[in-house]
Image (spheres, rainbow, N blue to C red):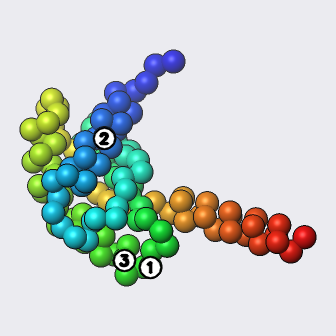
Amino acid sequence: MEFKRSQRVADLLQKEIADLVMRKVKDPRVISLTITSVRVSDDLKFARVFYCLMGEATHEEKQTALEGLNQAKGFMRQELGKRLHLRFVPQLSFQYDESLDHGNKIERLLKELKKDE
Protein backbone atom coordinates (compact mmCIF):
# COMPACT_ATOMS: atom_id res chain seq x y z
CA MET A 1 0.00 0.00 0.00
CA GLU A 2 1.45 3.35 -1.03
CA PHE A 3 1.18 6.43 1.15
CA LYS A 4 0.80 9.89 -0.24
CA ARG A 5 3.62 12.28 0.43
CA SER A 6 1.26 14.59 2.31
CA GLN A 7 0.55 11.78 4.80
CA ARG A 8 4.25 11.16 5.39
CA VAL A 9 4.82 14.88 5.90
CA ALA A 10 1.84 15.02 8.27
CA ASP A 11 3.29 12.21 10.40
CA LEU A 12 6.66 13.94 10.50
CA LEU A 13 5.06 17.28 11.40
CA GLN A 14 3.06 15.68 14.20
CA LYS A 15 6.21 14.23 15.74
CA GLU A 16 8.19 17.45 15.43
CA ILE A 17 5.41 19.78 16.63
CA ALA A 18 4.76 17.54 19.64
CA ASP A 19 8.47 17.68 20.47
CA LEU A 20 8.52 21.46 20.09
CA VAL A 21 5.48 21.93 22.33
CA MET A 22 6.94 19.61 24.96
CA ARG A 23 10.54 20.85 24.97
CA LYS A 24 10.91 24.27 23.37
CA VAL A 25 7.71 26.28 23.78
CA LYS A 26 7.87 27.89 27.22
CA ASP A 27 4.30 29.20 27.27
CA PRO A 28 2.44 27.90 30.36
CA ARG A 29 -0.82 27.85 28.38
CA VAL A 30 0.33 24.82 26.39
CA ILE A 31 1.78 22.69 29.20
CA SER A 32 -1.00 20.08 29.40
CA LEU A 33 -1.47 19.85 25.67
CA THR A 34 -1.10 16.83 23.36
CA ILE A 35 -0.84 16.92 19.57
CA THR A 36 -3.20 14.19 18.38
CA SER A 37 -2.89 14.45 14.59
CA VAL A 38 -1.92 16.63 11.66
CA ARG A 39 -3.59 16.88 8.27
CA VAL A 40 -1.62 18.40 5.42
CA SER A 41 -3.04 19.63 2.13
CA ASP A 42 -1.92 17.79 -1.00
CA ASP A 43 0.22 20.75 -2.09
CA LEU A 44 1.94 20.76 1.37
CA LYS A 45 1.20 24.46 1.89
CA PHE A 46 -1.28 24.15 4.79
CA ALA A 47 -1.32 21.95 7.87
CA ARG A 48 -4.19 21.61 10.33
CA VAL A 49 -2.84 20.56 13.72
CA PHE A 50 -5.28 18.88 16.11
CA TYR A 51 -4.65 19.06 19.85
CA CYS A 52 -6.33 17.99 23.07
CA LEU A 53 -5.93 18.80 26.74
CA MET A 54 -5.40 16.34 29.56
CA GLY A 55 -8.50 15.61 31.62
CA GLU A 56 -11.80 17.44 31.39
CA ALA A 57 -11.18 20.84 29.79
CA THR A 58 -13.49 23.81 29.93
CA HIS A 59 -14.17 26.03 26.95
CA GLU A 60 -11.96 28.74 28.50
CA GLU A 61 -9.05 26.31 28.89
CA LYS A 62 -9.41 25.23 25.26
CA GLN A 63 -9.40 28.88 24.12
CA THR A 64 -6.39 29.70 26.31
CA ALA A 65 -4.44 26.76 24.85
CA LEU A 66 -5.39 27.86 21.33
CA GLU A 67 -4.14 31.39 22.05
CA GLY A 68 -0.85 29.95 23.34
CA LEU A 69 -0.42 27.83 20.22
CA ASN A 70 -1.22 30.74 17.92
CA GLN A 71 1.29 32.89 19.82
CA ALA A 72 4.00 30.24 19.27
CA LYS A 73 3.06 29.56 15.64
CA GLY A 74 5.85 31.69 14.13
CA PHE A 75 8.48 30.16 16.41
CA MET A 76 7.28 26.65 15.52
CA ARG A 77 7.42 27.32 11.77
CA GLN A 78 10.93 28.70 12.14
CA GLU A 79 12.06 25.64 14.13
CA LEU A 80 10.35 23.28 11.68
CA GLY A 81 12.22 25.00 8.86
CA LYS A 82 15.50 24.23 10.61
CA ARG A 83 14.59 20.61 11.43
CA LEU A 84 12.85 19.47 8.25
CA HIS A 85 14.17 19.37 4.73
CA LEU A 86 11.14 20.80 2.97
CA ARG A 87 11.06 23.47 0.32
CA PHE A 88 8.18 25.22 2.09
CA VAL A 89 7.10 24.90 5.71
CA PRO A 90 3.30 24.66 5.76
CA GLN A 91 1.11 27.35 7.28
CA LEU A 92 -0.09 26.01 10.62
CA SER A 93 -3.64 26.24 11.91
CA PHE A 94 -4.72 24.70 15.20
CA GLN A 95 -8.01 23.03 16.01
CA TYR A 96 -9.20 21.35 19.19
CA ASP A 97 -9.73 17.59 18.73
CA GLU A 98 -13.27 16.80 19.88
CA SER A 99 -12.96 13.04 19.28
CA LEU A 100 -11.41 12.30 22.68
CA ASP A 101 -14.14 14.23 24.48
CA HIS A 102 -16.73 12.34 22.46
CA GLY A 103 -15.10 9.01 23.35
CA ASN A 104 -14.99 9.91 27.04
CA LYS A 105 -18.67 10.85 26.96
CA ILE A 106 -19.61 7.50 25.37
CA GLU A 107 -17.50 5.62 27.91
CA ARG A 108 -19.13 7.49 30.80
CA LEU A 109 -22.61 6.73 29.43
CA LEU A 110 -21.76 3.03 29.05
CA LYS A 111 -20.52 2.90 32.66
CA GLU A 112 -23.76 4.52 33.84
CA LEU A 113 -25.80 1.96 31.90
CA LYS A 114 -23.81 -0.88 33.41
CA LYS A 115 -24.37 0.56 36.91
CA ASP A 116 -28.12 0.77 36.36
CA GLU A 117 -28.36 -2.91 35.38
The single residue placed furthest to the right in the displayed view is: 117
> On the image, which quarter does residue 27 sit in?
bottom left
Q: Would you name the residue on which mark 2 appears?
A: 15
Residue 55's x, y, as percent? 47, 68
> What amino acid is at disc 2?
Lys
* Marks 1 and 2, how far apart at CA: 26 Å
> What amino acid is at disc 3?
Glu
> On the image, which quarter does residue 69 sit in?
bottom left
* Residue plotted at (25% across, 42% down): 16
> On the image, which quarter does residue 96 sit in?
bottom left
Q: Are marks 1 and 2 in contact (CB under 8 Å)?
A: no
Indicate the secondary structure of the residue bearing disc 2: helix
Up/down of 65 relative to 75, above or below: below
User: For mark 2, does the 10 Å Cα neighbourhood hold few (<14), some (14 to 19), or many (20 or more) residues?
Assistant: some
Residue 83's x, y, as percent? 14, 36
Indicate the secondary structure of the residue bearing disc 3: helix
Q: Would you name the residue on which mark 3 appears?
A: 61
Indicate the secondary structure of the residue bearing disc 1: loop
Of labels 1 and 2, earlier in sequence is 2
Q: Nearer the viewer, residue 40 or 115?
A: 115
* Residue plotted at (37% across, 81% down): 60
* Residue plotted at (34% across, 38% down): 10
Q: Which mark is residue 58?
A: 1
User: For mark 1, does the 10 Å Cα neighbourhood hold few (<14), some (14 to 19), or many (20 or more) residues?
Assistant: few
* Marks 3 and 2, how far apart at CA: 23 Å
Up/down of 74 relative to 27, above or below: above
The single residue placed furthest to the top in the displayed view is: 1
